[in-house]
Image (cartoon, rainbow, N blue to C red):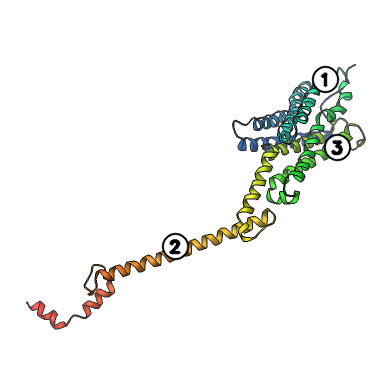
């Protein structure tokens, strides 16, 4: 049976697909540039994040091709996309691993490995479907979310739980002090929202005439926000949160003598005021020291010349006064020789 699987031809479907691919590619390229600019060369986690972004970018370019190139190019780039999805779960495991026990960590990464045969089947079904040979892809596609997203949902819930239970600050306090973490948490929530919409769309809970047949931009939006979560904080979550906790303790310790406590912002403002006062005191001490030094020099000069004899340090005004005090007759007699 030959299937008629072709590039979208109706204006609505073509516009939605082109917009979704352009949005995904542009977002991933920008995030890849940011990740490269902030990555540390010898950190494996940072390299995996960059690879995840680059692999995901390739699948956003098949809209430029036409059949028959369109069919095999779409299926080929889908291989890199599926690798990127699995790599995202590995990255999530590496970031969440410090919060997990040994058994939980092994179960996490073990189940990620166990679902890889599904992705081999999905890639095969994708090739067969877009080659017009089999409809197997229509049966495997609804299970993508089940083999792709549970680990990410667990990671998000784990992070929120550990922030609440293991650190001495609330969510709003954390967001005020670190907007980067605020973007991270927000991107996580939005990604899960689009995952839910994608599942409802694929299972035809929502759909009908709301979208052209075969067009689904929701997984692309979910993928972009997942990658944004990886890019905002390149290190693992525990390292990032421990840095913020250390920052809070350091700032609080610097103002304990003033009896000040509160959230990060209060402590930071108090620290700035304390630094300004210290700077003003230092300037006052320098000015007092300069005055004292000048006074000491004057006393030294007076003690070295008690009779008021002429010295080479006489200023211009004193010299003029001395010239005025000379008797004119002494001047004329002196000149007459």
Q: Residue 283's spot in the image, x, y percent?
A: 48, 62
Point 77% across, 34% down: residue: 223
Which is in the foreground here, disc 3 or disc 2?
A: 2
Query: From what the image shows, is residue 53 above or below residue 278?
Result: above
Point 55% across, 62% down: residue: 277
Q: Can residue 261 be seen in this view?
A: yes
Say what secondary structure mark 2 lies in: helix
Instruction: State which quarter of the image contains the C terminus.
Output: bottom left
Query: From what the image shows, is residue 80 above or below residue 177?
Result: above
Q: Residue 265's spot in the image, x, y percent?
A: 67, 55
Q: Residue 29's spot in the image, x, y percent?
A: 68, 35
Camera-side residue: 223 or 215?
A: 223
N-term mark: 1 or 2 = 1
Residue wearing tag 2: 286
Instruction: State which quarter of the image contains the N terminus.
Output: top right
Say what secondary structure mark 1 lies in: helix
> Quadrant of residue 181 in the image?
top right
Camera-side residue: 144 or 314?
A: 314
> Quadrant of residue 334 in the image?
bottom left
Callout 2 environment at 10 Å: few (<14), some (14 to 19), or many (20+)? few
Point 82% across, 22% down: residue: 118
Query: From what the image shows, is residue 79 above or below residue 189?
Result: above
What number is the disc on residue 89? none
Q: Distance between the residues labelled 1 and 2?
A: 77 Å
Q: Distance between the residues labelled 3 and 1?
A: 23 Å
Q: Can residue 212 be seen in this view?
A: no
What number is the disc on residue 121? 1
Residue wearing tag 3: 196
């Amino acid at each position: 049976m030959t299937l008629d699987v072709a590039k979208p031809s109706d204006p609505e479907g073509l516009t939605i697909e082109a917009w979704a691919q352009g949005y995904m590619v542009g977002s991933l390229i920008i995030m890849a540039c940011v990740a490269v600019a902030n990555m540390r060369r010898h950190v494996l986690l940072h390299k995996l994040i960059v690879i995840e972004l680059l692999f995901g970018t390739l699948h956003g370019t098949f809209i430029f091709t036409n059949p028959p190139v369109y069919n095999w190019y779409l299926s080929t780039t889908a291989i890199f996309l599926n690798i990127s999805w699995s790599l995202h779960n590995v990255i999530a495991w590496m970031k969440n691993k410090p919060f997990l026990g040994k058994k939980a960590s092994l179960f996490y990464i073990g189940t990620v490995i166990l679902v890889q045969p599904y992705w081999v089947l999905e890639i095969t079904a994708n090739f067969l479907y877009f080659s017009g040979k089999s409809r197997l892809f229509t049966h495997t596609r609804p299970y993508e979310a089940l083999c792709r997203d549970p680990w990410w949902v667990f990671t998000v819930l784990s992070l929120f739980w550990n922030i609440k239970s293991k650190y001495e600050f609330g969510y709003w306090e954390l967001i005020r002090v670190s907007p980067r973490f605020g973007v991270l948490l927000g991107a996580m929530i939005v990604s899960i929202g689009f995952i839910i919409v994608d599942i409802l769309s694929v299972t035809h809970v929502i759909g009908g005439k709301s979208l052209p047949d075969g067009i689904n931009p929701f997984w692309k939006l979910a993928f972009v926000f997942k990658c944004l979560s990886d890019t905002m904080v390149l290190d693992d979550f525990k390292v990032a949160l421990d840095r913020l906790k250390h920052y809070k303790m350091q700032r609080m310790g610097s103002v304990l003598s003033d009896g000040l406590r509160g959230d990060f912002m209060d402590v930071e403002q108090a620290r700035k005021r304390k630094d300004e006062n210290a700077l003003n005191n230092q300037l006052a001490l320098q000015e007092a020291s300069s005055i004292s030094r000048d006074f000491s020099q004057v006393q030294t000069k007076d003690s070295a010349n008690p009779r008021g004899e002429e010295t080479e340090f006489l200023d211009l005004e004193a010299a003029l006064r001395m010239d005025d005090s000379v008797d004119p007759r002494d001047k004329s007699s002196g000149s007459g020789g």
